[in-house]
Amino acid sequence: MIPEIGHFALVLALVVAVVQSIFPMIGAATNNAQWIAMAKPTARAQFVLLTVSFACLMAAFLESDFSVLYVANNSNTFMPTIYKVSAVWGAHEGSLLLWVLILSVWAWLVSVFSKGISAVMLARVLSVMGMIGVGFLLFTLLTSNPFERQFPIPLQGRTLNPLLQDPGLAIHPPMLYMGYVGFSVAFAFAIAAMLGGKLDAAWARWARPWTNVAWVFLTIGIALGSWWAYYELGWGGWWFWDPVENASLMPWLVGTALIHSLAVAEKRAAFKSWTILLAIFAFSLSLLGTFLVRSGVLTSVHAFASDPERGLFILIFLVLVVGSSLILYAIRAPKIRSTGTFTVISREMGLLINNVALIAMTATVLLGTLYPLFIDALGLGKISVGPPYFNTIALPLGLVLFSAMGFGLFLRWKKDTKERVFAKVRWVLLFALLIGFLVPILFMEFFDWKAALGVALASWVSLTALLWVQEQGRSPFKLPLSVWGAAIAHIGMAVTVAGISLTSAYSTEKDVRLEQGQEYQMSGYSFLFNGVKEAKGPNYIAQRGEVVITRDGQEVATLYPEKRNYGPGTMPMTEAGIDGGFFRDLFIALGEPLGKDAWSVRLYHKPVVNWIWIGSALMGLGGLLAAFDKRYRRVRRRITESKVVEQSDTDVKGNEVTA
Amino acid sequence: MSRLLIMLVVSVSLLSSAAIWAEAERITFKNAQSEENYTALVNELRCLVCQNQTIADSDADLAKDLRAKVYNMVEAGQSQTEVIDYMTARYGDFVLYRPAFKMKTLLLWLGPIVFLLLAIFFVIRWVRAQSSSAPVAMLSDDQRDSVRELLNKTQ
Amino acid sequence: MKKSALIPLGIFAVLVVFLAIGLGLKPREVPSPFIGKPVPQFSLPKLMAEGKMVSPDDLKGQVWMLNVFASWCVSCRAEHDVLTRLIRSEKLPVLGLNYKDESKDAKEWLAELGNPYQHIAVDLEGQVGIDLGVYGVPETFVIDKKGIIRHKATGPVFDATVRDDLLPLILKLREEKG
């Protein structure tokens, strides 16, 4: 019964989405107040329906209802409850339901927190989001229905991929989707602004907090994925430039460019048409990511479903959404006039360099990810593009970006002079170079120029951020959240880059054969291997090793690396033993038994690896602070302004009317 | 005499413990160059079975065989290029995670930097063109401070 | 309409074309770099004749196949019938490469399923497999009268593979001069 309710709710949601797409949009074009007013209720109804649908699927999992094919394929009665819950989005069909649910959540939030936005604009925004919902709901219902039943009903289900049976990985998809789908809000605002013909600073101001929050979620989602890969896969690696990883990084890079570009569009009435284009790109890349992951076009460990039929559906949807928005852009572009001018030395220029560097990085990642496909499609054979390529190109681009990050904070809007800026930052620059040079020499075993460069750039960015806060002239506690947000986010990025540079250059790995009672020395630590015993978990059997780590005679930690077997049809899983610390991680993974009580064991010493994720958390915090700055919440006093805006909205010929 | 004996005992025990530790390492190399070559190669060759891992990370049988092959070649003094040629002769360019620099990968390797340079060139040109229309006066630092004070008062 | 505003659309269109083509490709399959090149030389002990060696030269002048198999390989079991039928109906000489297998296990396997091979080479360490660019078992090479590899099939040989790929090629190659 419950799966039927869920299915029915899903179908109703599609109907509501169709209504949400059509009526408010036509109402906005013809100034039909009743049809315009349908936007909010339909968005809210969709949210309720999809919540019901999702809850039904979750109930089916919690009850282990194996008559539902999706439940039987991804769950069994022995699985711990938390993984029965995360299995709801653990495979293709359920993850799509999560996608549309989150889309409806964002639309609902927009409908609630939209007091300052004109009704006409809001109608268009929600309508666009409704259209996206229609596409995804059709895709789900026609090709990937999670509520499909099967008969006869098996007594036991299969299992969720053991790799996914982990708390970190349980939360990673919802975070990512909140980000991907969140960019649809900026996209919807851009489309609505183009359709309405009003491309002044207002749309940028409205879109900014939504875009910032979406960016925060995406940052956290990517960081969680990277952290999970590090502690779960057992190789000490945390980024592989795998196609699916790249699919999440690209919208993030463009999203970062977008949040900076929105700042300029809002404050300086410049970059207007470029910002619109970025909003389209960010969401398009989210959709492209969905396509790459689910179509089987690229090989990836992450790929959900390798189904060309589903891939075709998504491709058609992608063509419709992106194609129509780019056509609209081409039509409207001549009418978008940026009035703010600026000189070569100015904050606008700094942000422009930021955008160029980020877009160059995005283009590179896209090129590298799709290049094997291009070559194969042209019949030129099969090649691979992997980490060596991406790491090589990332270096110069990162250099450009980070240099700009430091100067950008100090440059004045519109016009500034080299001398003035240099006078402000020259000591910081010197200091940063010094730190970059000294840290490897003083704290590490040898000098690595890439690490030194990374540390220098990181110091440059964090010190300039702190100097900028101090420069504001007021007590730090009286500063607006947006200043704090920017400073913390920049420092977060710096911490991440410092972590990446140092850990890449100075990690140690040893693959050793250890017998029971044997000790091994590495990086100043002593590892005593106490053999391997069998241990049982709720749905697995493990070989559990014990390693006692000491340093200068003092005990540091005892770690229990495991090799788990989750049953037939699954690969053995490595659970690494990790002693985490602010300055280093000690990481141990069991290899395989080598006979005579001996095992192969991999030992890693990874300096400051946790800075990568601490930095990401800081970036997320910074973004969140900026999004909640007072001026976005002051909209209640703007009721009079919105009346003016409403009246000028009727001018649909595209003549610019500034509020 | 007893000092000599102590020194002898200490050095023997140090040597033997070093021997134990060295023994534990599963792969030992003739020299640093050999180890460097091995590590570099094994992290850049793609496993054809588990196609999203390097042969260093993969547990597949073929990965083990190929690691052993790389080890033997590297210990025999062969260069990284020679090992790469050997592998591509048998498995094609697919096995290289660092794409070879050829005609067909020209766009891949040169594309990004060309794009960056062109973008910066056009951007600077555009900015110069649009800024030359209106000369701008800058506020002095004193004027800025008084503006800031005024803003602070109205917060 | 400003022409430059159409550039993003243009780039997108090109991208979509490639993605659409991509839907029909097989990214996991790795093509053999040996197509059109001579079969790599080797000399391995024969499975069924103690002390004797076999090499590709023994089959020069004929159109033949090299089939990589092992007793531990489940797919090899699945393709065995199809392969046997092809060999019998076309009187096709096939050299079986027994890849990383214990000879005792291989002999038992062949005794159970039947031995359609003209020769069987024992590649215990897998070195010849590496020299041939083998990355999965089973794999099948089609070699012409001059000893040039003309086709490689990865994975088990099905009736469809025989009908569409192997048989037409074998017949065509037989027409060629040796």
Image (spheres, coloured by chain):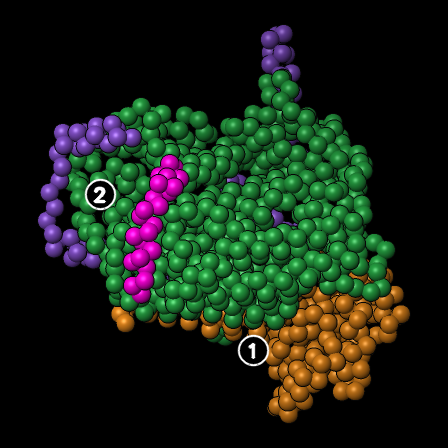
Chain colours: A green, B purple, C orange
Q: Give coordinates of residue B126: x percent, y percent.
A: 20, 57
Return the residue nearer the eye: A170 or C83.
A170
Q: Secondary structure at mark 1?
A: loop
Indicate whether residue A124 is drawn in magenta.
no
Q: Is residue B114 above or below residue C83?
A: above
Where, by quadrant of the figure, is residue A442 drawn? top left
Question: Real-space Cα distance between discs 1 and 2?
Answer: 64 Å
Task: Single out the residue that lies furthest toward the bottom.
Answer: C175
Q: Is residue A472 above or below residue C132?
A: above
The amino acid on which the numbered mark 1 sits, given as a three-letter code, is Gly
Task: Single out the residue that lies furthest toward the top.
Answer: B2
Q: Is residue B48 visible?
A: no
The amino acid on which the numbered mark 2 sits, given as a three-letter code, is Trp
Q: What is the span of residues highlighted in magenta in the rendered image?
A: A629-652
Q: Is residue A450 above or below residue C123?
A: above
Indicate whether residue A651 is drawn in magenta.
yes
Which residue is the site of mark 2? A413
Q: Give coordinates of residue C66: x percent, y percent.
A: 70, 74
Return the residue nearer the eye: A385 or A245.
A245
Q: Is residue C92 above or below residue A440?
A: below
Where, by quadrant of the figure, is residue A325 drawn? bottom left
Pinpoint the chain carrying mark 2.
Answer: A
Q: Give coordinates of residue A403: x percent, y percent.
A: 30, 42
A26 on left or right of A433: right
Residue ID at (21%, 51%): A340
